[in-house]
Image (spheres, grey):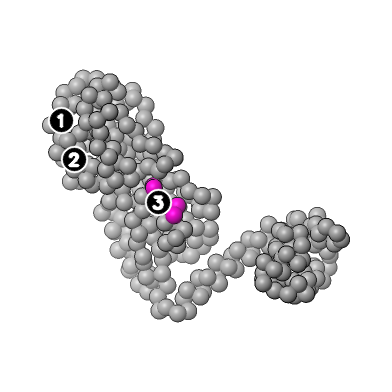
Amino acid sequence: MKLSIDQLRSFIYVAKFKSFSQAARELKKAQSVVSTHVSSLEDELDYTLFKRGHKIELTARGRALFAYAKEIVESAYIFETRALSLHNIKNPTINLGIDYSIYDSGLFNILSDFSKKYPQLTLNLTLLSAFDVGVSMSEANIDIALIFNQNLPETFNVIKIMDIENKVITSRCHELVKCKKITRDVLSKYRQIVITSQFSKDLKPIVLSPTHYQVDNYIYALSMVQKKIGFAVVPSLLVDLDADFLHDLVYLDDTHLNFNDSSLSIVFRNHALDFEPISFLAKEFQKHFIKYANKDNKV
């Protein structure tokens, strides 16, 4: 059996628009060409794919094959795009996004290993926030990203690495350290530093104090906490990964406050993991962070 991508693409478009003429317009081909593609495909299969008449409809066999045809054509498009990207440049390019709330020396170790394993690849690294991750994934053509609290369109795939406990943190010299019981009422009397970059318009930050500063950079926010400007509610991973903050900050006993967890996830385009270097990054990110999933880190 000899099948072509053009045959399958014409089959998909006719099925989608229920019209040979409309399919031809969408494909920018003559209607006779689209008709020939479908007819030759049916000849190869030795059965019909459409009920022809005033209304074009898929046969039972056509419906059974439609999803497989879409998958093959989509894979062919990805292959074609990737192949063309290699034609005019010396080195293939991978576009990586990282949530700029995540600053961890271990990530640089992963990128170092990546550079040694794939010396001919070019890497574009983009810093993302939850506010613009969807747009950045689309417009910057990000292949894979590591982010907090994503809210993405269905065109992207998500692998959740772990849920991360949100905890109240403050300077070791802050007055809150002396409080025997931490409640929302107690926290409302002190200034809060809110890290807005972890959140989107559909996922709001935890705000406990009417007096608060909003900061879209976690290093600045935790530095302000370090200087006793206020307390913060942050995913514990952010502090655990940064030794510079571990010595000066302390978690408060907030176990009864029942904050919702944050999530750390890998986001990637359809079929991106079929490209071995991208799959390598995804696996290394998971291996690096999964050690925290069942670990009770304490400052």
Q: Foreground residue, 163 or 139? A: 139
**14 lies left or right of 124:** right
Cα–Cα span, label 2 and label 1: 12 Å
Q: Residue 224 — which label? A: 2
For the residues carrying marks 3 and 2, which lies nearer the camera in this image?
A: 3
Judged from the image, the secondary structure of the residue bearing numbered disc 2 is helix
State the extent of the magenta-drawn residues as a range: 130-135
* Residue 49 is a magenta residue: no
Q: Which mark is residue 174?
A: 1
Secondary element under disc 3, as helix, strand or loop, is loop
Q: Is residue 172 left or right of residue 139?
A: left
- Is residue 182 among what the camera can see? no
Does any portion of residue 194 appear in the rendered image?
A: yes
The mark lying in front, picked from 3 and 1, is 3
On the image, the x and y values in percent for residue 226 come to 17, 39
Q: Quadrant of residue 89?
A: bottom left
Q: Determine if the magenta segment contains residue 133.
A: yes
Q: Residues within 10 Å of mark 2 (few under 14, many from 20)?
A: many
Q: Residue at x 46, y 45 (%)?
A: 151
Tally of numbered tags: 3
Q: Amino acid at mark 2?
A: Met
Looking at numbered disc 1 in the image, what kind of residue is underneath it?
His
